[in-house]
Amino acid sequence: MKRISAFTSLSEEQLRERLAEFKKELLKLNSQVASGANVQNPGKLKQIKKNIARALTLLNKKEVKQE
């Protein structure tokens, strides 16, 4: 997922699931980098971090709207 528009159609529960998936993937990639293994796609690390930030931003916006 590249754009925030792909996240806006998701419900809050789906956003939380995606966020958990992204965090697991980030953990896996970080462990590969730390162990010195060659990462297949080094740009994916940055992309996952941005996707986590996008998901968190939308979750925060949805929580503010509910209050």
Image (cartoon, helix red, strand yellow):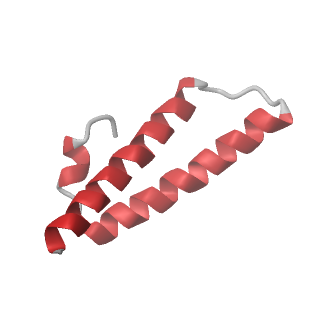
Spot occupied by residue 28 in the image (x, y as percentages of width and height): 68, 47
Q: Is residue 48 left or right of residue 55?
A: right
Spot occupied by residue 40 in the image (x, y as percentages of width and height): 65, 27
Residue 9, image quadrant:
bottom left
Q: Residue furthest right?
A: 35
Q: Is residue 55 above or below residue 34?
A: below
Q: Relative to the observer, which residue lies in front, 32 or 59?
A: 59
Q: Relative to the observer, which residue lies in front, 34 or 65?
A: 65
Spot occupied by residue 21 in the image (x, y as percentages of width and height): 50, 57
Q: Is residue 1 left or right of residue 44?
A: left
Q: Is residue 34 above or below residue 10?
A: above
Spot occupied by residue 44 in the image (x, y as percentages of width and height): 53, 31
Q: Residue at x 31, y 51 (%)?
A: 57
Q: Is residue 27 left or right of residue 7?
A: right
Residue 2, image quadrant:
top left
Looking at the rendering, in which quadrant would you find the C terminus? bottom left
Q: Residue at x 19, y 43 (%)?
A: 5
Looking at the rendering, in which quadrant would you find the N terminus? top left
